[in-house]
Image (cartoon, grey):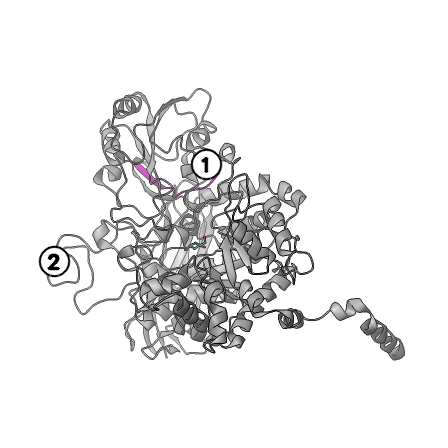
Amino acid sequence: MNKLLFFLVTCLSSFPVFAQRKTISQRVDSVLRLMTLDEKIGQLNQYSGDWEHTGPITKDGDKQNQIRNGQLGSMLNVMGVEHTREIQKMAMQSRLKIPLLFGQDVIHGFRTTFPIPLGQAASWDLKAIESAERIAATEAAASGIHWSFAPMVDIARDARWGRVMEGSGEDTYLGSLIAAARVKGFQGKGIGNTDAVIACVKHFAAYGAAIGGRDYNSVDMSLNTLWQYYLPPFKAALDAGAGSIMNSFNSLNGIPATANKYLVRNILKDQWKFKGIVVSDWGSVGGIARHGYAADNKEAALAAILAGCDMDMESRCYKDNLAQLVKEGKVNISLVDDAVKRILTKKFELGLFDDPYKFSNTEREAAQKFVPAHIEAARDLAKKSIVLLQNNGKVLPLSKSVGSLALIGPFIKAVRDNLGFWSIEWPDDSSTIITQYDGIKNKVSPATQLLYAKGCNINDRDTSGFAAAVESAKAADVVIMSVGEARDMSGEAKSRSNLHLPGVQQELIKAIVGTGKPVVLLINAGRPLVFSPEMDKANSLLYTWWLGSQAGNAIGDVLFGDYNPAGKLPISFPRTEGQEPIYYNHLNTGHAAASDTIAFYVTGYIDLRNSPKYPFGYGLSYSTFSYSELLLETKEMRKNEQIHISVTVTNTGNFDGEETVQLYIRDMAASIARPVKELKGLQKIFLKKGDSKRVSFVLSEADLKFYNDQLKYVSEPGEFKVFVGTNSDDVKEGSFRLL
Ligand code: NOJ
């Protein structure tokens, strides 16, 4: 037997195929040894394609020549199998035939558009979010894409910042769970499978804390806040296996993130031992000079490579300067080699060296268009993302046999505005977007009269449609109004100082509410908006974000009770813009705690309450849920022990439904002040009407830890409060001591 084994091993080792069975690292080294400095720098260079709906891929002859000369490592914005294949063919004409990586912003779906990420986060449904990314990855990978520039995991506490729509809101705990779910969704069973793409966690780091909510603005932040609130979602995404990370545009405490050695070299690469690719954001290497941290692009390239940025997206600073910097001895070739290795490793993991066209398969691409199961998943996540904010007089759910409905507002028949910012434009996708009008029409009985009146546009001052809208409202049994922000009013470079509804929509609401008819208001937006008094007067408020291609069907499901809304806000809603940034996990001050009365010498405003309009975690159901007092198994806990907390939740209403039970803690006195509440657990449960369920949570020492003033992650003995409830404000309370 042993002889046989010896014989087999000897045969196989002399067989040429066996020689190929080197590890990826050996294969990377063998390619690296063949590369000239120019070819190495080429791998660190990424350009955007000049993509148009129907091609061509890139008209720019210079880019094409650079690809053929091995001077490019990656492209973004090259869409579709035909185009990626054509570009890859150019790379195959280069001396070493190193395949290109194709990246794309797959932010909330690829062919199938899901709700915007902030909307998805309102579902608090990690499985559904992971499935959405699985679908997005499958569709993107079938279209020649290897790499998705998502998830965006920036904590965002300021609704003025346009990019709140792209993340999971204000909370570190929820944001970390969602970050991991998204990475798992994108990378599926692993990079290299033809239904997986490399995830790219972004933007490293603290981008969401842009001063004044102004996009790209500087960030000034204590290291404690950085570690405590802003870094954990990145760590969670990397622990889930994310293969790449993107620098952010902002400077952090005066140092541009792309040049920030502390962030990238020290934390990411040394402490966290990240082995994947660090890609700059668009032009952010060149941005280092514009920040005033480098005198010119050459100094910017030096700062970026020293800090640990491996790939230069679109600024050409590496291409134009790195070779010289190496020759001058300012950049050690080992830094360049390390960056190249990281990029080649991903190309090997994807299997591109074995088959550069592995992801450019026409049949697979065709098979991934308009897949019924994907459309169903988009509808499912869209309905789960809707948040019921108000339902006075229980106007909702509506009867499907209602006599007449007035359908008013610029979103009722809108098409692409349902998709929101960062959705991918396809020439053939308009027909697959379900409008809100159609979604409602599909639900009601043929006898129901639908009286449509647009009333106004999203963002101009034209009131000429008001009269007709008021007439239809008067003639109908119930009014459904759909208002909001246009799809390009939240997103990158879409910060707003005014968070009210744009145009004359508020005035239209006033006119319609003035008819005295029952009004259901649908609010479509990429961020928390400020509510005018007219909006509050609507009987029912549904926050629908931008729900994606199945918006109409999902809204129909909720309006007519086929689905009982269960979304919870992942971000606090301000009463006015002046409250921003506003977030639930703030610290107390030395003055009286924030309360809802306006008084002097308390921490607050003289003209406004401290509390938000709607707190983090808030969201109603057609049913009601009652919470029992908390049951804590013990009142004391040692560091190596756990504490069990339970509560009985009862569905006291008339509808079956889901409830997201939320657990928060507060460390009452510590060596550094701790927030008044911090989310530490969540459970989404389904209860039939009248049913009760005991919901249990377990806390261990790890849940009680925080970064102290020396940035050590510690727990400290003392009293902890624990809160369980339906949102961050409405909770039952208990306490225990950590010994
Ligand atoms: C700039 C954005 O900040 C980033 O998130 C995106 O991935 C790149 N552009 C590429 O489109």
Residue picked out by circle 2: 599
| Image location (x, y in percent) of residue 411 | 37, 34
Which residue is depicted at the point 48% across and 38% down? 550
Q: Nearer the viewer, residue 543 or 546?
A: 546
Residue picked out by circle 1: 557
| Residue type, numbered disc 2 | Ala
From the image, which quarter does the C terminus lie in?
bottom left
Regarding residue 684, the answer to whether it shows in the image is: yes
Say if 322 sits above or below 574 in the image. below
What residue range appears in magenta?
540-556
Pointers 2 and 1 in contact (CB under 8 A)? no
| Image location (x, y in percent) of residue 365 | 62, 44
Q: Picture quarter containing residue 616?
A: bottom left
Label 2 – label 1 distance at C-alpha:
45 Å
Say if 91 sits above or below 1 in the image. above
Q: Which mark is residue 129?
A: none
